[in-house]
Image: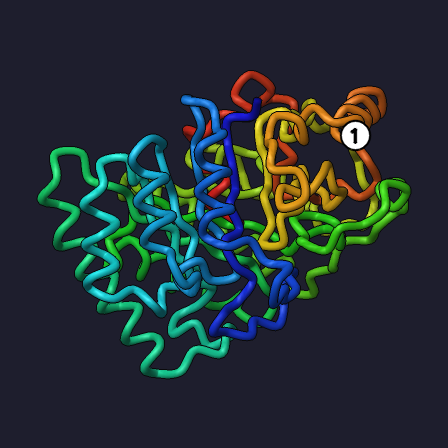
Amino acid sequence: MPVHYILSLTNECNLHCPFCFLDKVEGDRTMNTENWLEVLSQLPSYARVILFGGEPLMFHEFDRVFTAATEVFKCSIVTNGTLLTEETVELLVAKDNFCDLNISIDCLNNWNRNFSSSDWQHLLAGVKHYNRIRKIKETPPKLGISVVILDETAEELHDLHRFAHQELQCDFVNYCLLNGGPMQLSDTMQPFERLYEDVIPPRYHRWDLILEQIEKNRQYDKAHGYVSYFRPKIIDINSDQSTEKLRFLNKPKFGKERFGTCKMPWADCRIHPDGNISPCLSVPFGNFKQTPDLQAILTSSAAEHFKRELKDNSFFPQCNRCVFLYDKAFERTAGSSADNTRSTE
């Protein structure tokens, strides 16, 4: 059984981010609270749970699912931050198994995500309350800021980076690129044959500026002792390695020979709002609403076929510029949860 379980509680969201890769699933097809509680009851004792969306705080019984998850498992949340009430923040921090709150922010005021002024102020108030009460705990949960790198916000990356550390008092910033292909992390299931279709990742037109800003952030972290992550993991951005080594990522060709062995299908399990279960690429292993047996789905013929094909081929063409790719230099640490790789979603 995998270690990490990404529970996409809902595809509902109060924002309309233009680059979002998720579809809406409504009505009877969606998993209800009892379905999610049954999923949790079948997880192995060593599981790590990530509550995801859409916007997970829009799930109508988020409190019940979160409470059940944190009674047994280490748990993280990825949110846009606009629904962080004082009551919700206090619920999160009260649970000893709650590890980190990851908020998606791509620029100051989050204007690219169609934030209103009140959305931004509500986010700031929620973070302020979170920081105030988490510091009381002997082992406080962490705060991460997850940034999707975009052309339109390129010139703000360093300003946001300083703001995240100085004003938001985050513990780390996660940077990731736009998904390289339509099957990456998607909730729209595709036939297995599509894995072999070549994809050309979205091209950045301000790549030089982006690399310049990331380099400024690297140097800033080094000077102040801050921590950041960049996905795909080509360099350790907290080291002295130059960000020039990232330049090739904006090319269409998938140079898969430089990357380490993919372990994600063995380490991660994604459970979607409609009950479909998939690896990092959107091919279904089974559906939990139809077959409420997690282990049976994860050892199904579809799951075994996917893993066998991946092992034989190293990568699928649809893996091009996946955020979970890593340079062979990091072979030994790949799949570890210590570097917050899954907080970038």
- Where is residue 301? Give x, y as percent: 80, 26
Q: Name the residue located 70 percent from the left edge and 65 percent from the top edge.
A: 205
Q: Is residue 27 above or below residue 184?
A: below
Q: Is residue 145 above or below residue 40?
A: below
Q: Name the residue located 22 percent from the left edge and 36 percent from the top edge.
A: 96
- Where is residue 340? Give x, y as percent: 44, 37
The quarter of the picture where the N terminus appears is top right
Q: Residue furthest bottom?
A: 117
From where the camera sits, is residue 82 visible? yes
**Residue 86's image quarter?**
bottom left
The residue that mark 1 highlights is 306
Colouring method of the image: rainbow
Q: Nearer the viewer, residue 19 or 168?
A: 19
Q: Nearer the viewer, residue 262 or 72?
A: 72
Q: Nearer the viewer, residue 15 or 45?
A: 45
Q: Name the residue located 78 percent from the left edge and 21 percent from the top edge.
A: 311
Residue type at the position of mark 1: Phe
Q: Secondary structure at mark 1?
A: helix
| Neighbours of disc 1 within 10 Å: few (<14), some (14-19), many (20+) | some
Q: Is residue 114 above or below residue 193?
A: below
- Where is residue 134? Give x, y as percent: 17, 47
